[in-house]
Amino acid sequence: MIRSRVFLAVSLVFLFILLITYAFVDFREREDKAYDFYQSESYRKVLALYQEKEIPPGELELTILSETISQLEKKLNEKETTKELQTFFQSRSGTKLVEWETTRGTYFHIEDPYLPNLKKHGEGYKRALITKILTLTKPIPKPEVTNLLLKLILEDPRGMEDRFSRALANLLSFPFEPIGEIESDFLLQSLHFLANTSNTNLFHQTAILRGKNVNLRSGPGRENSEVGKISEPEEAVCLEEDAGTETIAGNLGHWKRCYFPNLQKSAWIFSGFLTEVPPNPALIAEFENRFKSVENEIRIDFEGWNGNQIPATFFGDYIPRDSERVSGETGFPIFGLSKESKSIQRICKKLSGDKNYFEFSFQPTDSDLPISFLELHLNYDNREHLAYSLSLDKESIWVNKNRYVLDGEKRRENLSLHIGSREGDKWNASLWRRNTGLIQSIRSLPMDESALQSGRYSWEICLPLAKEPNREKVILFEIRTGIH
């Protein structure tokens, strides 16, 4: 009896400790913790997750850390900043605190060890660079502005036009050193492209000057100092507008801060001396040619997706499901079929133009049975025709009836299906992991040969949805498609 009571007491104590541990210990992946801390503006907690000189290998972690450095640099330069934050960075071995003397006093700059380790031109790199520029609220030395400007104009803003345009407008508010003719052309191309894009603050903000010896000023209003004079037909791209109205020389208008390409600087000018003109189509065409390699690429992800509603740009019979967050990224769960139900329905996204590759990023499954997680359809004669079906089990990926055994690691995978030549009524495709071919000569299901020959078809991406979800699932993060 005594032994049983002792055993019961020990068991209760152990259970109590276990419950306390689960209640207060965070078992999430470090990337998820970092993402949540960043979103809640707990920037010091983000840094505390990592050793001071650690450079993590993942793009997501590097992006969050770089953005964290930018946000803390912003705090360092706010009026209410305490000495405690300065002391923290002065004693932190993983970062270096530099003091820049500027026209508005000392600027505290944190050298960012994470941005250089991000993949150039990648999504994370662009996001971190834009955040760094948007968090600038005080002037920094001209060479530093020039350095950021040259980095920014080499990036393709498509997909993040709004943030890119705000970053560019913020950066051009500061003086910078003269840039070369090629770089100046790149800047002008980007400005005109953004001025032609409706969801940006630069939309319809291209103008030419009318008048002679018009004053440029350091701020909005005639009480601000003169910083130069210009005459028609000087070009301008306006970056912001003062809310107040004023009448000058019989014209009612606003003060606008505009960038003047020929002067390579921005200044304030009264809008009565400006005439709006459409963005230059030749410059937009040059911009598009510069980034031609990605002009046909479509990227589908699930950031911002509300699980109760069908993902944006998809159509079909949607079955609500909760989103999944893995390493700070939102995934779309695709469930296997249950024993009770064998029926599925689909949601699809229509694609325009030719496509010859489909890249997909997913988290492997523990399912013994293959789970169909992605279908590629051809649409012709107003009907959808299945060409390729992709499935996963815990060991393999299947493309139609072709199987490739994965290495068993339960890590995120990036694979791509390359559509090759056509033979009669079937496409030929191959499955790749980066530069390594995994399966060759994967034939599609039969199609209408005349439709393929005439080109009167379009591709669709479809996600199969089980009507009765269960525990076995594949998590899909992203799909890219275009032309290589």
Image: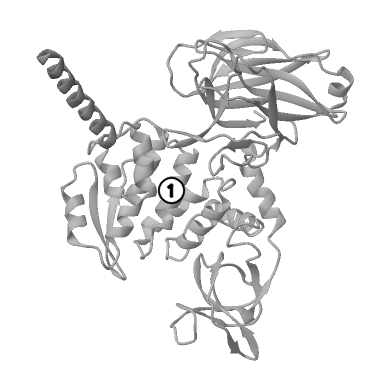
Query: Which residue ends up furthest to the front in the rendered image?
Result: 1
Q: Quadrant of residue 371?
A: top right
Asked if one can make out residue 168 in the rendered structure from this viewpoint, the answer is yes
Q: How many marks?
A: 1
Q: Secondary structure at mark 1?
A: helix
**Residue 193: x percent and y percent?**
63, 54
Residue at image location 20% in from the left, 56% down from the top = 86
**Residue 184: x percent and y percent?**
54, 56
Query: Which residue ends up furthest to the bottom in the rendered image?
Result: 250
- Above or below: residue 68 compared with residue 452: below
- Above or below: residue 332 compared with residue 415: below
Residue at image location 62% in from the left, 71% down from the top = 234
In the foreground, 223 or 83: 83
**Residue 465: x percent and y percent?**
64, 27
Q: Where, quadrant-wise, is the N terminus in this rendering?
A: top left
Residue at image location 64% in from the left, 10% down from the top = 440
Residue at image location 56% in from the left, 66% down from the top = 262
- Above or below: residue 323 compared with residue 204: above
In the foreground, 358 or 303: 303
| Residue at mark 1 | 129
269 lies left or right of 11: right
Asked if one can make out residue 147 in the rendered structure from this viewpoint, the answer is no
Q: Residues within 10 Å of mark 1 (few under 14, many from 20)?
A: many
Q: Which scheme is used to colour this image of the protein?
A: one colour
In the foreground, 433 or 34: 34
Q: Where, quadrant-wise, is the C terminus in this rendering?
A: top right
Q: Quadrant of residue 124?
A: top left
**Residue 300: x percent and y percent?**
60, 36
Q: Quadrant of residue 249?
A: bottom right
- Disc 1 marks which amino acid? Leu
